[in-house]
């Protein structure tokens, strides 16, 4: 069971996890907010753990200062939609109302309401893009599924089913479009050979810029927390 530790002033919260497989003390700062995690062998004494944290307090504060912090769906939060930041305004309305730079969101269940709306918008955009690109290749895509994945932005199965992260709807429009083209290209080439990239280049010239954006900025899309 995890234990919560606090060090320094102002205090830093650290989650201590003991493991039978750990051979040494290791300290990790999550890439997208959250409390640092200290993993320790089961038999390491508490005074050794405290000393380890004291020695690394300066490093820990610097690392936390460089880490993007989570964004909850609250009044005034700034959420990107198709690459454009929108300010959240909590209201008594039932559905989502979007205007340039503004999202009116129900006060009750704000996070789930907004994530549902974003998923619907993502499905529309991705369905349109994949259908268009598949037609250019003379292919018919299979089922389109949306998930909230951290390991990949999209995938294509051998039977032509496509999966995408719904968080792509928060990226710039051209980035979502590139991922759609990338996965549709797998309908023809189930690999990343030169022939595959030639298809991507035909479907989405200049795709490298959008791939680089994902590599550079994509992790930031996971800071937005929609769970209640």
Image: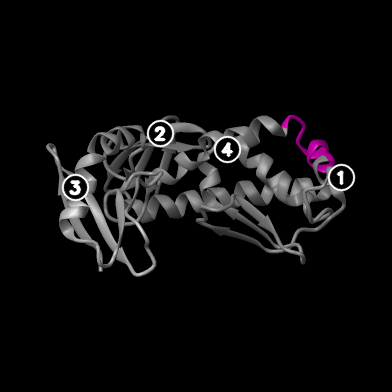
Q: Please tell me which of labels 4 and 3 falls first in the chain.
A: 3
Structural distance between the alpha carbons of marks 3 and 2: 45 Å
Residue 18 shows in this picture: yes
Q: Please tell me which of labels 3 and 2 falls first in the chain.
A: 3
Residue at (24% x, 62% y) in the render: 44
> In the structure shown, which secondary structural element does the residue marked by tag 3 occupy?
helix
- Mark on residue 51? 3
Circle 2 residue: 86
Q: Position of residue 198 (x, y in %)?
A: 84, 40
> In the structure shown, which secondary structural element does the residue marked by tag 4 occupy?
helix
Single out the residue that lies furthest toward the left: 9
Circle 1 residue: 195
Camera-side residue: 43 or 74? 43
Q: Which residues are magenta?
A: 198-206
Image depth: mark 3 or mark 1 in front: 3
Image depth: mark 4 or mark 3 in front: 3
Structural distance between the alpha carbons of marks 2 and 1: 40 Å
Q: Main secondary structure of the magenta part?
A: helix
Structural distance between the alpha carbons of marks 3 and 1: 56 Å
């Amino acid at each position: 069971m995890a234990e919560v530790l606090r060090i320094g002033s102002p205090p830093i919260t650290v989650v201590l996890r003991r493991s039978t497989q750990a051979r040494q003390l290791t300290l990790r700062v999550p890439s997208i907010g959250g409390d640092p995690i200290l993993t320790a062998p089961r038999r390491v004494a508490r005074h050794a753990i405290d000393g380890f944290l004291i020695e690394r307090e300066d490093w820990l504060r610097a690392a936390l200062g460089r880490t993007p912090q989570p964004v909850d769906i609250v009044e005034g939060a700034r959420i990107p939609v198709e690459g454009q930041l929108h300010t959240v305004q909590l209201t008594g309305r039932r559905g989502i109302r979007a205007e340039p730079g503004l999202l009116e969101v129900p006060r009750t269940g704000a996070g789930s309401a907004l994530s549902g709306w974003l998923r619907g918008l993502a499905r529309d955009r991705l369905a349109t893009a994949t259908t268009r690109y598949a037609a250019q290749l003379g292919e018919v895509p299979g089922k389109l599924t949306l998930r909230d994945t951290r390991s990949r932005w999209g995938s294509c199965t051998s039977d032509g089913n496509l999966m995408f992260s719904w968080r792509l709807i928060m990226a710039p429009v051209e980035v979502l479009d590139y991922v759609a083209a990338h996965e549709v290209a797998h309908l023809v080439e189930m690999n990343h050979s030169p022939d595959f990239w030639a298809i991507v280049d035909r479907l989405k010239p200049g795709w490298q810029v959008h791939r680089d954006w994902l590599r550079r900025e994509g992790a930031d899309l996971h800071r937005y927390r929609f769970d209640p």
